[in-house]
């Protein structure tokens, strides 16, 4: 009897471990993909660079996995296909960054403040949308463009060049250029002049370039080509 119980334990233990290792992933807990077309260089690679490459890049490859190149990033791991093109809910990369794999949250928790911060729901949504849209990854080295934000780069420019006419006190055309909310809202005459991510539909570019025939050319506070390019990059990156 003792031998029988021993043999039963020997056979049952591996089965139990296998069952634990293959615990189903509850994809209903995943944040939804964000809407809109995702740009790999501007939106996806910066997440990889900030949160993943220090442990999964050229200098270190934890778990023998790298995410700094397409060839390496698409390799399968012990946890299944890392990136399943068109199916983010089946991609183990998404399962791990969302904390759905036991003891495998990526990036891993750290005792040091400011390090290994988990990805936000929006960041996970960006990566999900990227995978669902085909997981496009351009050939060659990725040149990550410096983020341009309203608070850090654009607000001061608008205040100095546009504030005298489009400040807080009865702004011309009802267009207040001093806050992100009012800039995106637009004016009473033109409506929205900025369409985040769409330069062609953002009439502000035509206006500040002096190409709008219905408006006088901005001679006194005319923006330089470099400043206009900054505004263009801000809009192209989503006008955040």
Image (tube, rainbow, N blue to C red):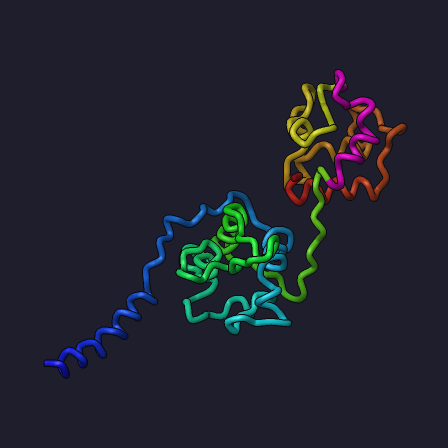
Tell me the magenta residue range. Answer: 152-171
The residue furthest top is 170
Residue 61 drawn at (x, y percent): 57, 72
- Left or right: 69 with respect to 17? right
Q: Is residue 235 magenta?
A: no
Q: Residue at x 32, y 59 (%)?
A: 24
Quick check: 223 above or below 77?
above
- Left or right: 163 with respect to 117? right
Q: Quadrant of residue 188?
A: top right
The residue furthest front is 2
Residue 116 drawn at (x, y percent): 57, 57
Residue 25 drawn at (x, y percent): 36, 57
Give the number of marks. Answer: 0
Q: Is residue 166 magenta?
A: yes
Query: Looking at this view, is 40 or 124 the one in front?
Result: 124
Quarter of the image with the N terminus in it: bottom left
The residue furthest bottom is 3
Quarter of the image with the C terminus in it: top right
- Left or right: 58 with respect to 176? left
Residue 128 drawn at (x, y percent): 49, 52
Q: Quadrant of residue 15?
A: bottom left
Q: Residue at x 27, y 75 (%)?
A: 14
The residue furthest right is 220
Q: Residue at x 54, y 44 (%)?
A: 36
Quick check: 15 above or below 185?
below
């Amino acid at each position: 009897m003792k031998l029988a119980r021993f043999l039963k334990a020997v056979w049952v233990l591996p089965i139990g471990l296998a069952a634990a290792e293959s615990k189903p992933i509850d994809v209903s807990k995943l944040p939804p993909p964000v809407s809109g077309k995702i740009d790999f260089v501007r939106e996806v690679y910066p997440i990889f660079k900030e949160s993943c490459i220090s442990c999964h890049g050229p200098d270190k490859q934890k778990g023998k996995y790298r995410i700094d190149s397409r060839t390496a990033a698409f390799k399968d791991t012990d946890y299944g296909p890392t990136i399943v093109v068109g199916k983010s809910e089946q991609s183990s990369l998404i399962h791990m960054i969302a904390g759905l794999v036991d003891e495998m949250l990526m990036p891993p928790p750290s005792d040091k403040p400011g390090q290994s911060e988990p990805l936000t729901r929006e960041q996970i949504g960006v990566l999900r949308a990227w995978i669902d849209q085909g997981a496009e990854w351009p050939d060659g080295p990725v040149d990550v463009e410096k983020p341009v934000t309203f608070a850090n780069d654009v607000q001061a420019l608008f205040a100095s060049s546009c504030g005298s006419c489009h400040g807080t006190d009865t702004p011309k055309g009802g267009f207040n250029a001093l806050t992100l909310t009012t800039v995106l809202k637009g004016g009473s005459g033109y409506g929205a002049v900025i369409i985040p991510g769409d330069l062609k539909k953002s009439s502000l570019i035509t206006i500040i370039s002096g190409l709008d025939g219905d408006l006088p050319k901005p001679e006194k506070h005319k923006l330089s080509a470099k400043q206009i390019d900054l505004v263009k990059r801000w809009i192209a990156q989503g006008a955040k």
